[in-house]
Image (tube, grey):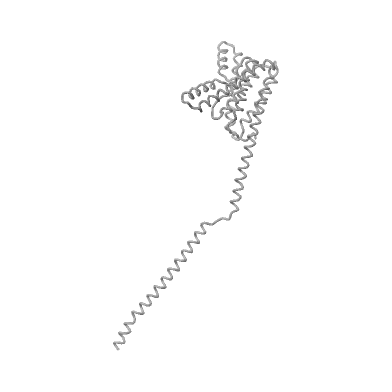
Amino acid sequence: MLFNNFKRDPAPYVFAMFAFIGGFLEAFTFALHGGVFCNAQTGNLVMLVIDFVQGNISGGLKYLYSILAYIAGIFLSTVVPARFKKVNWPLVVTAAEIVILVGIAFIPQGAENWYTYVTVSFVCSVQYNTFTKLRGVALATTFCTNNIRQTVMHFVKGVSEKDRAEFKKSATYAFVILCFAIGAAVGVLSAGELGNYCIIICSVLLLPVLALFVTDSTLSVKMRRMVAAESQSVTEYDKELPAVPDDGVKVSEKNALTSESISVSDSVASEENMANGTAESSCDVPSEEKSVERR
């Protein structure tokens, strides 16, 4: 199942869960781990530059680590699906994210924050680069800047052109934004009550998503095996059929035509010879009569 490249467009439920988790993790790292936003790196890049310019090198490093982890996640999620096309990458990402998020929950309280936000940055980058389209609409599950832009653009275009397809696209972006916001709200509320353990909520929500991918992958494997078996049976049936020597038939027909033409030509020739013989005998009669007259 892990090595079956299932490429069907994910269901809206899948994107709803990942958008929820994106908002949850944004609130989780900001509230509990140093005020760092790990899902996107624009703010981290700005904070990195500010700290370095002000001479706060150690303060800027936490942002640098987050950026490097994000780059590593994008690199991995680009190279692996391209090089290993038989791997069911969405399934692998979902399973790995469940395990990693549970691991984050058990990081000791006294540990440095960069352990958490570096790991979360890596997870968010892989998630962002894996789940990119919902029903043909390109969107993000880990931040909302472009989603808000697309929501407004498609809505305006739908109004001006009276196109329902544009309204549907706008509604898709708005749906993802809503899930993201709900995740952020649940994240900040549960962080105050549960601390690091609140992140287990994300892993629990991903279990049905993992089950969905496993089920779809299993069905896909069965369908491929059925198609392969049918094609193999057709091939074996073709092999059992007697071969029809088309060339041999053509050669025999050609030989029959040749023999018929030869027999016809022979009969024509014999008739001509008989005619010639009759003509010669009729030509000899006057000579005999001449000889009689002479006598």
Q: Quadrant of residue 97?
A: top right
Q: Nearer the viewer, residue 97 or 14?
A: 14
Q: Quadrant of residue 96?
A: top right
Of residues 273 and 140, the one drawn nearer to the viewer in this rendering: 140
Taking 101 as reference, is 82 above or below it? below
Task: Please report the residue visible at 55 percent of the width from the left and 30 percent of the height from the top.
Answer: 135
Q: Looking at the figure, which quarter contains the C terminus?
A: bottom left
Q: Quadrant of the N terminus?
A: top right
For the point 40% across and 73% down, the residue is: 271
Residue furthest to the bottom in view is: 295
Q: In the rendering, at what x and y percent does residue 287 appear?
A: 32, 82
Q: In the picture, residue 99 is in which quadrant?
A: top right
Q: How far from the left and from the top, in percent, is residue 293?
A: 29, 87
The residue lying at 61 percent from left, 45 percent from top is 230
Q: Is residue 239 above or below residue 109?
A: below
Number of marks in the rendered image: 0
> Outermost residue toward the top?
54
Position of residue 164 in the picture relative to residue 206 (left or right):
left
How far across and how far down the image is residue 82, in percent?
57, 32
User: Closer to the camera, 207 or 292?
Assistant: 207
Q: Is residue 49 above or below residue 253?
A: above
Residue 183 x %, y %: 62, 20
Identified at 46% across, 66% down, the residue is 260
